[in-house]
Amino acid sequence: MSTAVHSAQELRELVWQWRQDFPLLQRTVYGKPIVYLDNAATTQKPTAVVAALQHYYTECTSNVHRGVYYLSEQATQLYEEARRTVQRFLGAAEAAEIVFVRGTTEAINLVAHCLGRTRIRPGSEILLTHMEHHSNIVPWQLVAEQTGARLRVLPITPDGELMLEAYPELLTERTAVVAVVHVSNSLGTINPVAELIQTAHERGIPVLVDGAQAVAHMPVDVQQLDCDFYAFSGHKIYGPTGIGVLYAKRRWLEEFPPYQGGGDMIRHVTFERTLYNDVPYKFEAGTPNIAGAIGLKAALEYVQQCGLERIAAHEHELLRYATERLQELPGVRLIGTAQRKAAIISFVIEGVHPHDVGTVLDREGIAIRVGHHCTQPVMEFFGVPATSRVSFGLYNTLEEVDRLVEALWKVIRLFGVGGNG
Ligand code: PMP
């Protein structure tokens, strides 16, 4: 199927077809058709993913890399095919640069831990940005405590963009690594990661990109970006939970010590000394999430079949329309108004706690996220304890945006916002 971007009408028709692939979207809550707008937290799963999991469990259950028998060879083949699918999806140079992990969180912890043992020293600096998810802050904080390094933070603007003019001065001879989010989960900002990487590389500094909110919404090519590390989670790209990916350039995986010890990551063990396995197996101790990897392969194939350009074009239209409609509402303030945004809208309604917004919407069958979205420094910057967040996926429709706006009018009337009592 061609992935050429279609007209708005063609895209809308395609979306109605895509919706048929997601059984959960057929269900109702409180007697109303569900409107699922919490895709930044996790996405619904298409039947192709559920079928891939079922196929593994009913036809090929066995462990990988160990058995000499038919089933195990088949499971190993499926698992390694999944690695090659991820490699092609990310445009990595080789499959060995793909490490299967639990998710973005584990990928970042792995890199932080290993850099902590190889490159980060007392006095080193770890450069983050003010819009990082807690999972791209806390692992570095742990490493900083252990090594005597310190965190530096690239500030953001009131629009929720990175303050790029401050970046070059923050890169010093002490900077051991830059860790930056590709798309902010609470602001929707798309960061210019290619430029950030280039500037860091001119000074010989490696860069980790947190791609948790990017890969399901735009094409990503790690060789084009030239990032040293790229992390994402399967469950945010229509795949299973408990599986994720760390892409790392081979030279880093060769240089790094193992992150965890156990079966499968070794070549030979004696009580005196262990010889480690080749990359990427050196980083996959123990029985991996075999079904998860197989399910992730199905999810990536599904997304590619839909076409990432088409998904991006459709979600852009949802973002444009929803932003326009939300701005019509009294008392609504958008948090995050960057020039380049993915389909995430955070907002607050004057005088109404986000939890109340979420609860009223829930009774209307609309699922949104309310809270700090694991980005408390962002909340602090904008002077709010929490926001309401709408995040779109490929199956959302303009009609669902209308239902959201109708439900928000209910909130506004209920709480008497802007004299609408
Ligand atoms: N980074 C970002 C930007 C995220 O949105 C998330 C999930 N909300 C994570 C990291 C962590 O992902 P996971 O919980 O799947 O490890």
Image: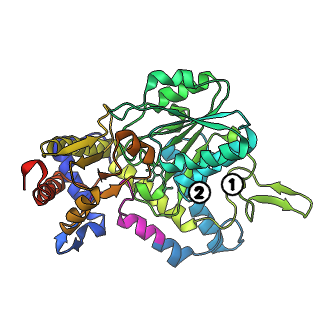
Magenta span contains residue 421: no
Upstream in the sequence, badge 1 or badge 2?
2
Residue at image coords 27%, 39%: 5
Q: Where is residue 100 in the image (x, y as percent from the top left)?
A: 59, 56
Q: Nearer the viewer, residue 9 or 235?
A: 235
User: Residue 283 has which mark?
Assistant: 1
Dot 2 amino acid type:
Val
User: Residue 269 has which mark?
Assistant: none
Residue at image coords 54%, 53%: 105
Q: Quadrant of the C terminus?
A: bottom left
The residue pinned by badge 2 equals 101
> Is residue 186 among the parts visible in the rendering?
yes
Dot 1 amino acid type:
Phe
The reply to whether the C-beta atoms of the residues labelled 1 and 2 are less than 8 Å apart is: yes
Quarter of image, res 201? top right
Q: Nearer the viewer, residue 59 or 30?
A: 30
Magenta span contains residue 49: yes
Q: Nearer the viewer, residue 121 or 208?
A: 121
* Residue neighbourhood size for the residue with mark 1, other residues' Cα within 10 Å, grouped as few (<14), some (14–19), many (≥20): many
How many angstroms separate mark 1 from mark 2 (CA)?
9 Å
Q: Position of residue 328 (x, y in %)?
A: 12, 43
Q: What stretch is highlighted in magenta?
A: 35-53
What secondary structure is marked by label 1?
helix
Outermost residue on the left side: it is 420
**Ligand 1: does it lie within 8 Å of the C-beta at label 2?**
no
> Is residue 392 among the parts visible in the rendering?
no
